[in-house]
Image (cartoon, helix red, strand yellow):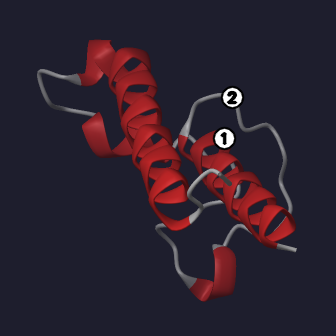
């Protein structure tokens, strides 16, 4: 049961990463934004929108990859901490 919960958590985190990246192509909600919040637009690519106009905009993909790696590493450490190996 714990594995299913952790798999659901990782799938949700992966969906959020996918939505933040430029690779999101789905338009699952109206143009007014998810739950009426304009900042959560249906096209995704939020990281690119946040970095637009800064010096970091050319490094969007690199920032996304490093951020995803760090968050997934923290999730792995948390999983290892909460689920010690059986002896």
User: Would residue 15 be seen by someone viewing this image from the given angle?
Assistant: yes
Mark 2 and mark 1 lie on one chain; the one further toward the N terminus is 1
Specify the quadrant that holds the N terminus. Answer: bottom right
Q: Nearer the viewer, residue 52 or 16?
A: 16
Determine whether label 2 and label 1 are within 8 Å by CB: yes
Q: Residue 3, labelled with which disc?
A: none
Residue 64: where, in percent of width, then height?
42, 29
- Residue in view at x 86 percent, y 66 percent: 4
Q: Is residue 74 above or below residue 23?
A: below
Image quadrant in which you'd find residue 53 = top left
Instruction: Name the residue at 71% across, 60% down.
Output: 12
- The residue positioned 11% from the left and 21% from the top of the image is 55
- Mark 2–mark 1 Cα distance, whole angstroms, equals 7 Å
Which type of secondary structure does the marked residue at label 2 adopt?
loop
Q: Residue at x 59, y 62 (%)?
A: 83
Disc 2 target residue: 23
Viewed as shown, does residue 3 lie left or right of 84?
Answer: right
Query: Which residue carries the number 1 mark?
Result: 18
Judge depth for marks 2 and 1 and give the one in front. 1
> Camera-side residue: 49 or 4?
4
Secondary structure under the numbered disc 1 in the rendered image: helix
Where residue 7 appears, as percent x and y from the top left, is 79, 57
Neighbourhood count class around disc 2 (C-alpha, 10 Å): few under 14, some 14–19, many 20 upward: few
From the viewer's perspective, is residue 24 above or below residue 15?
Answer: above
Q: Is residue 86 left or right of residue 69?
A: right
Residue 62 position within the rendered picture, expressed as x and y whole percent measured from the top left: 37, 16
In the image, taking residue 63 as reference, residue 14 lies left or right, namely right
**Residue 30 in the image, given as x and y percentages of width and height:** 78, 71
Q: Is residue 86 above or below residue 9?
A: above
């Amino acid at each position: 049961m714990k594995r299913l919960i952790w798999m659901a958590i990782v799938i949700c985190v992966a969906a959020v990463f996918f939505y933040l990246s430029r690779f999101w192509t789905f338009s699952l909600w109206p143009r007014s934004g998810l739950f009426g919040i304009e900042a959560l637009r249906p096209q995704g690519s939020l990281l690119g929108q946040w970095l637009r106009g800064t010096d970091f905009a050319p490094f969007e993909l690199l920032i996304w990859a490093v951020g995803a790696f760090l968050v997934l590493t923290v999730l792995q450490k948390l999983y290892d901490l909460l689920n010690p190996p059986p002896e």
